[in-house]
Amino acid sequence: DGDLPVSAVLTSASVHDSQVAIPLMQMTVPRVTWLYDLMDAAYDAQAIHDFARGLGHVPIIEPVQRGAWVPLDPAQRRRFGERSASERVNGRLKDGFGGRTVRVRGAAKVMAHLMYGVLAIAALGLWQRLC
């Protein structure tokens, strides 16, 4: 909640987002306390559900259509709407802080370039809360 980035992982384009869901949760546990894991259908895997529950979280993951589609209940759907906050951060990083046009080579340089953008987004978010 709040559009503030807490953890980030740099991967190659060939790595699916769901492959870093569990490492991101592990990385974030010592930093903040949260209750809900909100993820889109790309993360609908039993291992992710189980890991989230093991952390004491409530996984709200949009179900992939396998046979008969089971929609989220109204309370989960409302909470799932909060997921747009993380999408706003991603979009802001891409559109306003050079995340779409990285012009450096090498993982360390790319990570530094993107983390400067994440740092700026976090600083602006904190500044907005103070003012």
Image: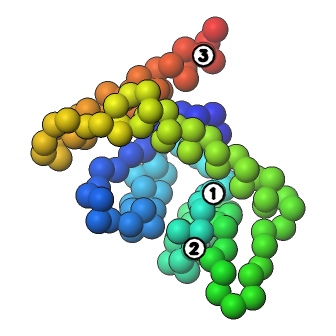
Q: State the separation of the CA atoms marked 1 and 3.
A: 24 Å
Whole-percent x, y for residue 18 in the image? 45, 67
Quarter of the figure with residue 80:
bottom right
Viewer-proximal residue among 23 and 32: 23
Q: Is residue 50 above or below residue 17?
A: below
- Density class for disc 2 (Cα within 10 Å; few <14, some 14-19, many ≥20) is some
Whole-percent x, y for residue 71 in the image? 78, 73
Residue at 30 percent of width and 59 percent of height: 13
Residue 44 is tagged as 2
Horizontally, is 79 left or right of 73 in the view?
Answer: left
Q: Amino acid at mark 2?
A: Asp
- Density class for disc 1 (Cα within 10 Å; few <14, some 14-19, many ≥20) is some
Q: Secondary structure at mark 3?
A: helix
Disc 1: which residue = 38
Q: Amino acid at mark 3?
A: Gln
- In the rendered image, which quarter contains the N terminus? top right
Q: Secondary structure at mark 2?
A: loop
